[in-house]
Image: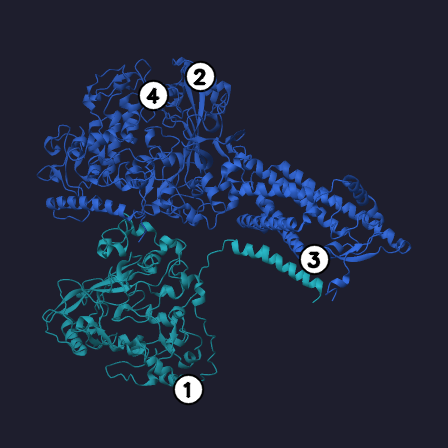
Amino acid sequence: MTTLRRPWLWLVVGVGVLLVAAGMAWTAYAADDAPTAAPAGGGSPMHPPVILRDADGKPVVETGNPVSTIKTCGACHDADYIASHSYHADVGLSAWAPGQQAEPAHPWDASPGLFGRWNPLLYRYLTPAQGQPLDMGTPEWLMRFGARHIGGGPAVLSRDGQPLTALTPDPDNPETAVLGPDGQPQAWDWAASGTVEMNCFLCHLPNPDNEARLAALAAGQFAWANTATLDATGLVHATDQGYAWNTDMFLSDGSVPREVLPIQDPTSQNCALCHGVVQAKGDNEPLVIRPGDLQQWETATTGQIFAADRVSESGMNILGKSDLQRAWDVHAERDVQCNDCHHALNNPAYKEEWEDRPRYLTYDPRRVEIGDYLLRPDHDFARGYSSQVWVDPESEGTVRACSDCHDARASHEDWLPYTERHMMELACESCHVPQIHAPALAQVDWTVVLPNGQPRRILRGIQGGTDPVHNEIVGFEPVALLKAMPDGTQKWAPYNLVGVWYWIYDDPPKPVPQHLLRAAYLDGDAYRDDVLAVFDANGDGQLQGDELRLDSDAKVQRIAQNLEALGLAQPRVSGEVMAFNINHSIADHNWAVRDCQACHSESSRLAAPMQVAWYVPAGVDEPSLAYNAHVTFPGTWERTEAGLFFRPQPREAGYYLFGHSAYPWIDWLGALLTLGALLGVVVHGGLRLVGHLKMAQEAQAHGQVRLHREYMYGFYERLWHWVQAVVIILLIFTGLVVHRPETFGGWLDFPLAVRVHNILAIILVLNAALALFYHLASGEIRQFVPQPRGFFNQAIVQARYYLGGIFRGEPHPFEKSPRRKLNPLQQITYFGLLNVLLPLQILTGLVMFGAQLRPDLADKLGGLRFLAPLHTLTAWAFAAFVIMHIYLTTTGPTPTAYIKAMVTGWEEVEEHEGSAPTVASADTPEAEA
Amino acid sequence: MNRTQASWLLLLGGIVLFVFVPLAVFLPKARAAGDPWAHVPERPAPTDHHNLMPGPYETPQDVTRACLECHPNAAQEVMQTSHWTWLSEPMKAAWRGGEEVQLGKKNAINNFCIGIQGNWPGCTKCHIGYGWADANFDFQDEANVDCLACHADMTTYGKGKAGLPADSVDLTAAAQSVGGPPTRDNCGRCHFNGGGGNAVKHGDLDESLYEPDPELDVHMGKYDLVCVDCHTTEHHQIKGQALSFAVEKHEQVACEDCHSPRPHEDDRLNDHTDTVACSTCHIPYSARKWPTKVWWDWSTAGRDDIPENHYTYLKIKGSFRYEKNIVPEYYWWNGTVSYRYILGDEIDPSKPTMINPPAGDIHDPNAKIWPFKVHRGRQPYDTQYRILLQPWTVGKGAFWDAFDWQVALEKGAEFAGIPFSGEWDFAETWFFYPQAHMIAPADQALQCTDCHGPNGRLDWQALGYPGDPAEWGGRESSSK
């Protein structure tokens, strides 16, 4: 059994639910003999049989009228509350204010929703006010856009809140006018057509007949649209006039048996009718989508599919399908329904943690009980921070976030280095939507029209056509953009981009009506001769392929003139890029991006470009990005022969991505420094060798340099030195792997390199600290401190020795002794190393390591963009030092004398005039056993 | 050791201690996964018997006697097993007030060919002995043990009536072919053909397992296991127990013999293993290659007006239905039966009689949800005594010869030692086969929504849950 954090809370809710359930079950039992069995084909066993009523509240079985959902469902539920608490019904009507929409909005938008906000994909423009040329009036909006509208709101009420049926038919009023076949407005009589109440059946029946509903809407039979939704239940049948009730299906009291009308909690299938492709495992039909079909909105715009089936089981021609043994969406696979996350906001089962509670309270028992909820369920559903939804801003961010159900730390920290940091900067979807295995819209060009009046559409993720069964679906990798949260934070998240080009006219601008655009291009179903004259390059009387593109000023001018001739002032081409956020099609851990180098490499997927245009109409600047919410575009536009691309630039956006964001000049500089050191020692060593060989003959003449043995380094000194040596070399190598995994990652796995690097760094710091303590406590620290007096002279002497005397076999200018181990040049080198380089390296490293806990601290110190290159440069300096240091160990009396000394402690020391051995070898008991 | 060496060693030790030990300690460890192969027994090297069995052999018993010269205990060991006795150990039958019973093919009936008594020559073809042709078979004669059935190369050997070698068998060649441990062919010849033909009986055992695809059986097809790798054997006692006569629990082959009880990467899946048998998810369908018999109606047997077809009707047996890719039925099962029909038990002919219903329910901590193939059928019963009857089918004048139910049932009752009133009809019976073979590769295992959610294949309420345990909680909370 799962552990419940608040067992008593669940108990209270549980008991409440049980009591109500028991009550309702008893009621149901009293009315029906089968209290517990769910009706065949779904439906809640708790919902009683329903008496279908008409707008007057009379049973439809008696009157034969269309069903009124408000009167039918309103018998028990507060239907007015539901209808007024639903942005699905409202779709912007309540915020109707032409030209006064808050950003981001087009200047010509009249509302934030489907009713009044112009959507370039749907194109048709709802004419906002009387006096404008009619593009689309309210009746036509309902015929066309009603397909993805639940009814209620603007399907019932006028823009000023009156019943539509009360409006006087008037061809000049866009609320009561439709475009006739001749392009002239005609009056629409709402009283005759009826209106569309909020359609409870569409979401609460297991088998709503959406096709019948769409047909009724398209035919303008608005009063019958909701009744048509019942077509599949057998309760009605279509007639010439609308629908007729099959009275034998009704019980004597006018109600309908539960088996016939099984009311249920909405399932994902219900949502799918308007939102996209959903398929539950078990319906055995191989999944096939209709690419680009906007009735499958989310799927068309992003390729998202919320289905339990495996990709391999689909009926589509997907590249490498047989290996894609993953579900389209892991949540669907695990039986999560849409409304589990997009729940009714006042559903007591989904009561969220109480965020702004007083400190001393953990639970408030005074809340909506289940009975109250069933009376007035809030139909504003929890939703996220969508880039393309603007209605009901209060409900933004109410959707169940990943972290509401998942403890990402628990599942990542045992393998993902810098877990916190990743969670802070990346939306879960960034890795858990590794690939979209379906096509999605990529470019929609409304500057031209096909003979059927449609724009040119280009899909990404499918090759050679748009038929998902025969053309090959290769899918696509979403582009990474920064999703901006209202609290000011932002995260990388996956998106699909759609480039849209269209004509606007007038000032303030408006989109060109579709029928006029069509008229500018077409004469009936054929292209106009004046258009063909400019567009038809091969003269075959058809416009195909590249011909139908506004790729020259001549073409643009031709169409502009045609539009002007149709009465449109200043026609011009405009464009925008629509970003669609991707939050579904989630892959489980086996399929998510787990390879560090997917991002931490030169070809990082965080920086992968996305094409938004295969051609850009002539004379158009970069498309506008202004009409997207909660998203910023952290990168650059690249316009090439192939089209227009957006390329994210993480480093320029302030994100230093290890393995990807390296500055080449830093590495060139560092490599130069290191190579310089290498070259220096090679040349110096060569000269020494030459000198040595020359002197070999004269050695006898000069006589031997006298040597004696000194106990130079104590055991601890040798130990800390060698530990540090090993650690520094390993740090340099692991650092290289992290820095440029493509070049150096062959021998070590990236995440392993990161972890080894971090552990070694801690060892380095501890070792340095202990050594510092030793040197301070023993006073040996003085060895490292240059003595001001005579220092420069001595340094010059030492330098001259290295540049001259050493080649001639001269003795070292300063005698080395346990009291004075370092010559002046060493002193200044170590002084710099230990006081500048090492602390700098430790500090930059530490801050970068700590950036996941205290990102503010890292930001104060310049951010990773500054710290990381500095760390890299210092590392190069260390590498140069190591080379010099190792070389200089060979400059003793014999090439290995110094190394031996650092191992055994005993060093052969040159004897200088006037000096005497400080320690007799006899003092050491085990001299040379 | 000189001073230099000592210094080297000390410093090296220090570096290891201060650099590499911390690395080893603090680097994340890969989770140790159990290796199932560690539990797979090593197969003994084959012994070439060509020179050991020179022959020639007059009778199959001569072969056995030759075997016993080197393996003196083998026959006695075999004679202790149910392969020989066709009877279980004495067990207490709870539904008979704790009466001690011994059940087996020898004396119990099923709903396929029903029973062997009186029909020995036909049925004992699969007995591990020679010559069980009537009730007088000598179960004490070591020479009657058939070593070759399990140890010969099956290209050289085959059994015929009463378990005797088929006429064409060259006994010397068969004896010389003996080598390693029993192969799939040795086991499969009987076990893949239970119920009278390939794939008829079990749903998870058929001839496709001689050379299975990896997709069909991951153990045998991909990893090349043979039957006795899991059905391990000691002194000829082969591990494993069919549900047919499992009145008490015996040692059973289990996935956990080799696999961890929590073998999945995902804890959510591992949380299932206390409640759900491995095969429930890992056998997505039964009879994935050959159709298996799911319905057998004896009442139409003997008619000439129905066209004969292997899969639908045979005059000697009646009407059938075969299915393949069957969605199994799911029941709680603790390894035993809650009841086993014994000859003479009264039935209620108005409803199906469960011959061997699996024992266990949601409250039984030892029970898990298992997949079953259920064989349903209609078989003769005595309408007056309300007991199932066992027809005499094999022999001159028996049902398969004369098609006379009156004679077949009267004579059969005599053989079986049960009364017969002379009045009979046909009653529906069910026979249960838990599915444990033909394990599919992991990526074909059932997924969440195969069981959970609106279209799931499990009937939660029938299993004793208030509803889908994904929503209502598991058996711990449901069984309170």
Q: Earlier in the sequence, mark 2 or mark 4?
A: 4
* Identity, as a three-letter code, of the amino acid under mark 4: Ala
Front label number (3 vs 2): 3
Front label number (1 vs 2): 1
Residue identifier under label 4: A110
Residue B185 seen = yes
Q: Colour of chain A?
A: blue
Q: Are both tags, 3 and 1, on one chain?
A: no
Side of A713 where B424 appears, left or right:
left
Give the residue furthest to the right.
A701
Q: Is residue A502 above or below residue B277?
A: above
Residue identifier under label 2: A560
Q: Are both tags, 2 and 4, on one chain?
A: yes
Q: Quadrant of residue B69?
A: bottom left
Q: In what quadrant of the picture does the C terminus of chain A appear?
A: bottom right
Q: Earlier in the sequence, mark 4 or mark 3?
A: 4
Question: Callout 1: residue from which chain?
Answer: B
Q: Are both tags, 3 and 2, on one chain?
A: yes
**Residue A39 percent across, percent down from the top left:** 19, 46
Assess disc 2: are there few (<14), some (14-19) or many (≥20) residues with their C-alpha within 10 Å of its C-alpha. many
Front label number (2 vs 4): 4
Looking at the image, which residue is at 43% across and 78% down? B178
Distance in Å between CA atoms under marks 1 and 2: 107 Å
Q: Quadrant of residue B171?
A: bottom left
Side of A400 where A529 appears, left or right:
right
